[in-house]
Structures are given as C-alpha cells and as structure tokens.
Image (cartoon, rainbow, N blue to C red):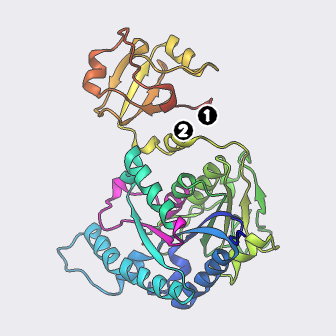
C-alpha cells in the first residue's frame, strides 16, 4: 500500500524582516518559533513549503559597529554575513525540533538572469523538496550591491514561487494586507480579494515602508499582481498573528488581502523570460514587418532581416529587449548572436533567427 500522503501543493512563504526582528533589530526568536511551528504543521499535512526569509542584515546590525572607513554598502554586507548565520542557525535549531532538516539557498539577481544558473537553482530546490529538506531562501546580501539587488525579498519570493511552480505565495509583513486608507484609521477597510485586473488599487497604498525591510506595500502589490497573473494565488497577511499561515490554508476567515490567481500559466522558458526585463542587456529595434509578424497570432521568430538597429552590448544567450520603430517595447527574448555579430548582420536574410520563437516573449501575446 502506498502510505504517502497526497501532495497538497507547493507553498512559498515569505517572512519580512519586521516580522522576526525586535524594535532594536535583534531576532525575535519567539516569533520565529511560532512561524516554524506553522510551517512544520503544513509539511506534516503534506504541503511542500519553501521559506523565503529576510532578517539577515537586521540581525547582524547589533553585532558590529563598522569603522568609519567602512562604506554603508560594505557595512550592510558585513551585517548580512554575520546575521545570515544567526538567522539560519535559529531556523535549523527550531525546525530540528520537528525533525525537519532546513537548508540554506542564497540567491543573487544574477542567479536568475542566466538560464543555466536558473535551472541549477531550480534543480537544487527541487532536490531539497524531494528529500524533505526545507529550503530557506534569502538574497546573498554579502555580494549583492545596489544596482544588482532584488528590489526586496518580495521580488525574490515572487521569482522563486514562479520558478518552482508554487500554487500559493504568502507574503508576511507586519500589516494585515492592503487597506483603503491608512491602516487603523476610521473608514479604512481591508481589501479582501482582488483580481489581477483590479484598477486603482495603487492609489490606496501609501509608499511608506516598515522600519528595517527594503520592501513596502506598493512593491508587494506589484509583485503579487504579477505572480497572480501567472496562476499563483497570493496572500498578503500579517506574520505577527499567531497561526496566520495555517489559518489561510485552512480557508479560515482571518484578515488578509488575497490577489486571486489568473487561470493562465506560462510554460517554463516564457515564465523565466517574464521576470527577465531587468536583466536585459541590449535593445534590438525591428521594422514594421517584423513587428507585425511578432505581434500576429502566428508563431514567429525574430529574424535578422527585420532588425534595423542594435543598442548596447550583449553576449550570445543574453536577454535583449525588442523595440518597434516608434520606440515602444514589444517584448524581449534570448539572443542567439552577440551584439557585435548582430550588428554585422542587420537586415540580412539569415536562416538562424536573432531570437527563436521559443525564447521570445511578446507583450500582448504571452
Ligand atoms: N535580504 C535582506 C535581509 O535578509 C532583506 C531584504 C528585504 O528587506 O526585503 O536582511
């Protein structure tokens, strides 16, 4: 007989810095334990869970006052180096109590920009889940510098849940969700459910941020909407509430904002490309004919004959943005030529496309 419990689905849970740190930035181990208990319950029930946890920089801050000649960037890197170890040792210890081995995955934005790195990371997390090792993901803050950083861990958790085909993403911070005004003020109501087509939500959201984390509600909402558009149900909820994760998954009437999943799911490569705009290295301008072909319902590749101009430097395999003659971005794709060769072959009738259909994401089509 097969005793294996049926898989209930794959859930990504993102824990914000403010949920697991005290006002002075030190780790709130009591809160961490509450979260660990809930994740342990889910795993026992048959869910596959991926935890994305912030808190490294805050946890290290109290341990070191860097010397005057250390820059702010270096200070943050050092705090992360110190704090990430603390974060993980607490998680390992707490999950260990439940017999759950917890492993660390540190990602950089670059890990997502290269298709091979992306697949390596995906294989690693898949292998961890298969072997019942809980992946705990954070950005590798020790080697990330501003321009190459994820906007925040909300963005990272979105990319992870998309890459790992999760069915649910839960974003936990210290507010209950998206309100129609300032939370706690009279008349301000929690928006319970939104779909990806909801309009005017942005105007409700103040751009203020929580004290330690990088993200804010605006970035949470924009990530949530993008991820829901890929067929993943997203919940924005308050991680300070006991049993919030388990309550959400049980369908209990607890406070949260749910951004309901759209039915459409993208295939592997298109999904990767969907998150690649910020990695793009160059711009390829195309003529009207190529534009029409790409936007049509036919499966068309981008051929060199339709290219009119190349901007920027890129290598073979890099992501390039595709613009029409009116300077509008119509999509992006993975280039089969480097920029030097592409420049050389502009307008030529070559068999090998600049971007093959399978590696092409056209805005209005995919
Ligand atoms: N990776 C950062 C940390 O662990 C957090 C980034 C964020 O606030 O979203 O401290």
Spot the residue most to the front. 1
Q: Please report the bounds of the magenta region as a residue range.
A: 129-158
Neighbourhood count class around disc 2 (C-alpha, 10 Å): few under 14, some 14–19, many 20 upward: some
Location of the C terminus by quadrant is top right
Spot the residue most to the top. 349
Point out residue 238 in the picture as x, y percentages from the top left corner: 66, 75
Location of the N terminus by quadrant is bottom right
Image quadrant where residue 169 sits: bottom right
- Which of labels 1 and 2 is toward the front? 2
The tag on residue 366 is 1
Pick the front one: 144 or 189: 144
Neighbourhood count class around disc 1 (C-alpha, 10 Å): few under 14, some 14–19, many 20 upward: some
Q: Is residue 145 left or right of residue 168?
A: left
Image quadrant where residue 43 sits: bottom right
Pick the front one: 118 or 309: 118
Within the magenta stretch, is there residue 48?
Answer: no
Image quadrant where residue 344 sits: top left
Mark sitting earlier along the chain (1/2)? 2
Q: Residue at x 50, y 45 (%)?
A: 275
Q: Is residue 149 left or right of residue 270?
A: left
Q: Are marks 1 and 2 in contact (CB under 8 Å)?
A: yes
Q: Which type of secondary structure does the marked residue at label 2 adopt?
A: helix
Q: Which type of secondary structure does the marked residue at label 1 adopt?
A: loop
The tag on residue 270 is 2
Within the magenta stretch, is there residue 146?
Answer: yes
């Amino acid at each position: 007989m097969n005793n294996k419990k049926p898989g209930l689905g794959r859930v990504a849970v993102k824990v914000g810095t403010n949920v697991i740190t005290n006002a002075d930035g030190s780790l709130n181990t009591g809160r961490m334990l509450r979260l660990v208990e809930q994740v342990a319950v889910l795993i026992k029930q048959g869910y596959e869970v991926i935890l994305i946890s912030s808190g490294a920089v805050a946890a290290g801050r109290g341990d070191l006052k860097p010397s005057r000649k250390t820059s702010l960037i270096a200070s943050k890197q050092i705090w992360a180096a110190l704090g990430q170890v603390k974060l993980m040792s607490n998680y390992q210890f707490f999950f260990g109590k439940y017999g759950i081995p917890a492993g660390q995955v540190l990602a950089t934005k670059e890990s997502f920009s290269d298709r091979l790195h992306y697949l390596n990371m995906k294989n690693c997390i898949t292998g961890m889940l298969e072997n019942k090792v809980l992946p705990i993901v954070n950005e590798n803050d020790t080697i990330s510098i501003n321009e190459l950083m994820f906007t925040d861990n909300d963005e990272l958790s979105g990319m992870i849940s998309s890459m790992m085909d999760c069915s649910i993403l839960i974003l936990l911070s210290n507010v209950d969700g998206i309100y129609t005004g300032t939370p706690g003020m009279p008349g301000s109501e929690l928006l319970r459910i939104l779909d990806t087509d909801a309009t005017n939500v942005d105007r409700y959201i103040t751009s203020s941020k929580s004290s330690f984390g990088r993200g804010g509600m605006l970035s949470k909402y924009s990530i949530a909407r993008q991820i829901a558009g890929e067929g993943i149900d997203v919940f924005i909820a308050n991680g300070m509430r006991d049993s919030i994760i388990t309550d959400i998954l049980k369908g209990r009437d607890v406070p949260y904002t749910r951004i309901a999943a759209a039915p459409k799911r993208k295939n592997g490569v298109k999904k990767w490309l969907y998150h690649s705009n910020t990695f793009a290295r160059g711009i390829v301008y195309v003529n009207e004919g190529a534009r029409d072909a790409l936007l049509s319902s036919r499966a068309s590749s981008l051929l060199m004959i339709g290219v009119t101009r190349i901007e920027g430097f890129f290598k073979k395999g890099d992501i390039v943005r595709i613009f029409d003659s009116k300077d509008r971005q119509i999509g992006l794709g993975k280039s089969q030529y480097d920029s030097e060769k592409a420049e050389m072959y502009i307008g030529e009738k070559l068999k090998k496309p600049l971007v093959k259909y399978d590696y092409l994401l056209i805005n209005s089509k995919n």
